Amino acid sequence: MKKTEVGCPNCGSVVEFTASVSLVSVCRSCGSIVARSDRKIEDHGKVAAIVPTDSVFHLGQTGRFREHPFEVIGRVQYQHPTGGLWEEWYIAYPNGRWGWLAEAQGKRYLTHARKITNHMSIPAWEDLTTGSSVRLGDDVNFSIQEFATAFLASAEGEIPFSAFPNVPHSFADLSGPSKGIATLAYKEGQVELFIGHEVTLGELGISPNDPKLGLNGDSQQAPIVKGLALNCPHCGGSVEMRAPDQSQRVTCSYCGSLLDIDGTNLRYLTTLTTQIKPLLPIGSTGTLAGTEFTVLGFVRRAVYFDAEYDWDEYLLYEKVTGFRWLVHSDLHWSFVEPADPPNERGQTVSYDGENYRLFQRAWARVLHVYGEFYWKVSVGDTVLMLDYISPPHMISIEKTPTVQIPSRLFEAKNFSNYKYSESNCSFGTYIPHEEVEKAFKVGPLRRGAAIAPNQPAPNYQAIFFGWVVFIFLLIGIDIFYSTVMKYTVAHAWTFIAIIILSLYPIAMLLHKGAFETSRWADSEFSPYNSNS
């Protein structure tokens, strides 16, 4: 692609424009946002320095999507209103087309601008609500997962829109069929639409063995983010951060202070009075699903039904895979990873060809935090939680209300009275205690007497198969003795043996019924309850 050079209005350095559609470029010398138009070159102000991350992408990297070559020519970092920082990479094709690459939770997404037509139903900003359907074409419906107003924090390279530092960026993220995604960008009374889907490095023409190298052999490397140690502003103790480019909150292990992270600065928020010792120590490592994770954080949360029920969640991190969770509830364990939104149908959802039934719906409140987190978590944070089960799996949907739920309403079930700005989905798999003990070298861990919502039932099919085999074996022995040995008394003994053996599968049937009844005992949506 042919480059155009202009002089920076602030410092006079050369500023390059690679793509014809790029409206601004960040000066490498002074950090000014240089905007170009048909008439003049303008200085839109300086942006803050880019926060180093472990992204596999970098400026100048090249790739190929569906036989179309592209080059990474820009990068934008946004500050989420809840405190998180996310970035998007601007790519340009030789034919003038452009798109955005984004990373989240170990997944990568590619979107391109799409013209809004009369066949689409684009909602106004004030009409947005999570879970609502948006038609983006004939028989193509997307679901709103989140909407918020973020701010431009930093940028480098080129950008295809007119940018100013700290300018608000109102957006809505949507999910669609076949891992499709879409973004609606609202600004100055106008709406822009971007549609795409999840992609792999292979689909982008980037080698997974060396993702920081472009296809042109460029040896440019993105900065490798290492652990960081800072001093607690409350007690002066050393606070270690294992994912400083991702973390937004951290607790001091010396004084129990909850600290806000702003770059390389820590700000005291509050002292957490309740000290709980996690079963899995912060900083410990363990291998699950073939990946070695580090335990970053610990959260205790609770829901309320007839009483308060709490459980623990361990935040796991690996720089390529991203974040995962290990949930410890009622002395049972589940491995949880981010998931695409399921298809909801009343009290059931469908995910990856499997149907799940609603198990519980309640406000989930944070009781205690310890460690390091990628969002600005605080004690008292409350979300609407919906758990759907199909053992050994569970689909959990968490919806964040636009206002904080008062503690006095924690026990109320007035879910429809609130508007929700974000919806997150996760996929959980039941894990035997032995697997957790082996992975993190802890234990022996206590076993739970109660049945977990997603605990797999015993293998009843194997029991019935064994029963059938024994029955046929007895019948074969009976035929042998009665026909060959002429021992007719065998009929009576065979009949008695069949009756005795049949008690076993009958007992298993009763156990199966009791097992499932026990699983749903605390659920208001139990299929064994005529009122559910």
Image (tube, helix red, strand yellow):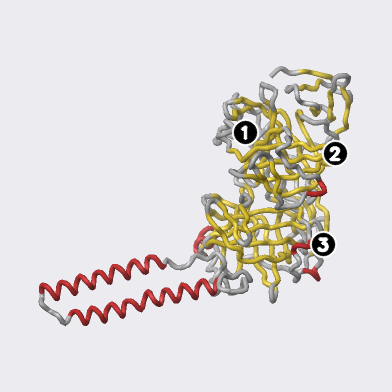
Give residue 232's position: percent from left, percent from top: 79, 56
Query: Label 3 is placed on what type of residue?
Result: Thr
- Read off the residue under disc 3: 270
CA gap between label 1 and label 3 equals 40 Å
Who is closer to the viewer here, 91 or 146?
Answer: 146
Query: Label 2 is placed on what type of residue?
Result: Gly
Who is closer to the viewer here, 530 or 59?
Answer: 530
Kindly identify the residue that appears in the image at 58 percent across and 58 percent down. Answer: 428
- Crowding at mark 2 (Cα within 10 Å: few <14, some 14-19, many 20+): few
Who is closer to the viewer here, 529 or 307?
Answer: 529
Placement of the N terminus among the 4 image quadrants? top right
- Read off the residue under disc 1: 212
CA gap between label 1 and label 2 equals 39 Å
Which of the 4 image quarters holds residue 203? top right
Question: Disc 1, disc 2: CB below 8 Å?
Answer: no
Classify mark 3: helix, strand or loop. Answer: strand
- Read off the residue under disc 2: 189
